[in-house]
Image: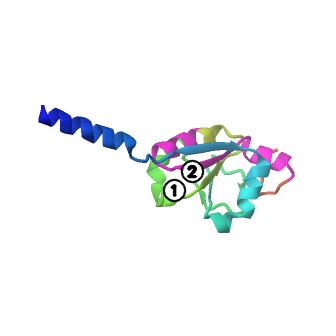
Amino acid sequence: MKTLTIILLLLLIASCAPQQQKELQNIDAHRAKELLDNKEKTGLFVLNVHTPYEGKLEKTDAIIEDWENMAAHTDKLPKDKNTPLLVYCRTGRMSTSATKQLQDLGYTKIYHLNGGMKAWDAAGYTVTDKTFK
């Protein structure tokens, strides 16, 4: 009986402990621009996951074209899982998958650019090395 009481007490304590909140925000190009403008202040890490390469946003920190296997590229990602990440691709399809994988890897603050580089371009912002129409 004493062992059961201890186990229940430990479970209660564990359930009350603060949990790391895994936050994913789908954002538009204008919000992404705000984040990029404040990149240095916030420590934002910018990740392009589009394959094949068709351009990038200014201030991109890494390009991982193997968007289906993010776990194989942790060496290119921030070590601190609380680092805010801005993830994008050309249209948003590949980056949607990548953001889910990043959450599974433990990243807690992820911004996903809805519509990707196409939405960024349509909003009037520059895509470096743009090859898509």
- Amino acid at the residue labelled 2: Lys
Tag of residue 99: none
Place of residue 125 in the rendered image (x, y in percent of width and height, measured from the top left): 83, 55
> Is residue 129 visible in this depiction of the protein?
no
Task: Tell which circle, 1 or 2, labels the residue nearer the N-terminal end.
Answer: 1
Position of 124 with respect to 80 (left or right) is right
The x, y position of residue 114, in whole percent, is 71, 41
Farthest residue to the right: give it. 124
Give the distance between the C-alpha atoms of the residues marked 1 and 2, in whole angstroms: 6 Å
Residue in the foreground of this view, choosing between 20 and 107: 20
Determine the residue positioned at 80% across, 50% down. Answer: 30
Quarter of the image holding residue 2? top left
Mark 1 crowdedness (10 Å alpha carbons): few <14, some 14-19, many ≥20:
some
Q: Which residue is mark 1?
A: 82
Number of numbered discs present? 2
Magenta stretch: includes residue 122: yes
Is any part of residue 79 visible from this angle?
Answer: yes
Q: Which residue is mark 2?
A: 109
Quadrant location, the C terminus: top right
Label 2: which secondary element: strand
Q: Which residue type does callout 1 highlight?
A: Asn
The picture places residue 16, in percent across and down from the top left corner, at 38, 42
- Of the pair 79 and 23, the residue shown nearer to us: 23
The answer to the question of whether label 1 and label 2 lie on touching residues, with beta carbons closer than 8 A, is yes
Q: Is residue 73 left or right of residue 89?
A: left
Magenta highlight range: 97-124
38 sits left or right of 109 in the view: right
